[in-house]
Image (tube, helix red, strand yellow):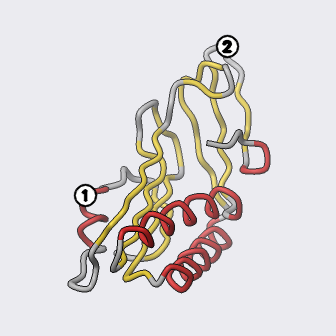
Amino acid sequence: MSGFHLSDQPIDSAMLGRALGDASAGACVTFEGWVRNENAGRSVQRLDYQAYVPLAETEGERILGEAKQRFALVDAACVHRVGALAIGDLAVWVGASAAHRDAAFAACRYIIDEVKQRVPIWKNEHYASGESGWLHPDNTPAE
């Protein structure tokens, strides 16, 4: 399954990785982003993701297309969760396969960085204090 997808269901990273396999690929690099229990010094209990679906899917596909051309990829995919997630849940998965590992590593990094910057997905963090706060790439601390 190549392409960009939003999902309200848990991500099957093993299945996604296998789908990027090809006889011409010598490398496959994947990235998993998990929900963590702390952000910017605040204790996080859970979070919710929301997206503007039509634009998110269009922009996500555009990013994958750019990566495929820029890094001569065999294939690439990205799945981002939407909805309520608990600490430890897999929130985003990126995979890139290429003839050589350098291209696969660089492409995987490019894809996640561009998705975080360009795709309209918002995160509402729920804190231990009872407060919550919406984050978008414009105001999310760099990873």
Q: Looking at numbered disc 2 in the image, what kind of residue is underneath it?
A: Ser
Looking at the image, the residue that sits furthest to the right is 138
Q: Residue 133's spot in the image, x, y percent? A: 73, 32
Considering only vertical position in the picture, is 19 above or below 32?
below
Residue 77 position within the rendered picture, expressed as x and y whole percent measured from the top left = 43, 70
Q: Nearer the viewer, residue 110 or 60?
A: 110
Residue at label 1? Answer: 14
Residue displayed at 23% across by 68% down: 18
Task: For mark 2, give the secondary structure.
Answer: loop
Find residue 16 and report its image quarter: bottom left
Q: Label 1, secondary structure: give it.
A: helix
The 10 Å Cα crowd at callout 1, few under 14, some 14 to 19, many 20 or more, is few
Picture quadrant where residue 11 is located: bottom left
Closer to the chain start, of discs 1 and 2, is: 1
- Name the residue located 50 percent from the left edge and 66 percent from the top edge: 106
Residue depicted at x 61% and y 79%: 62
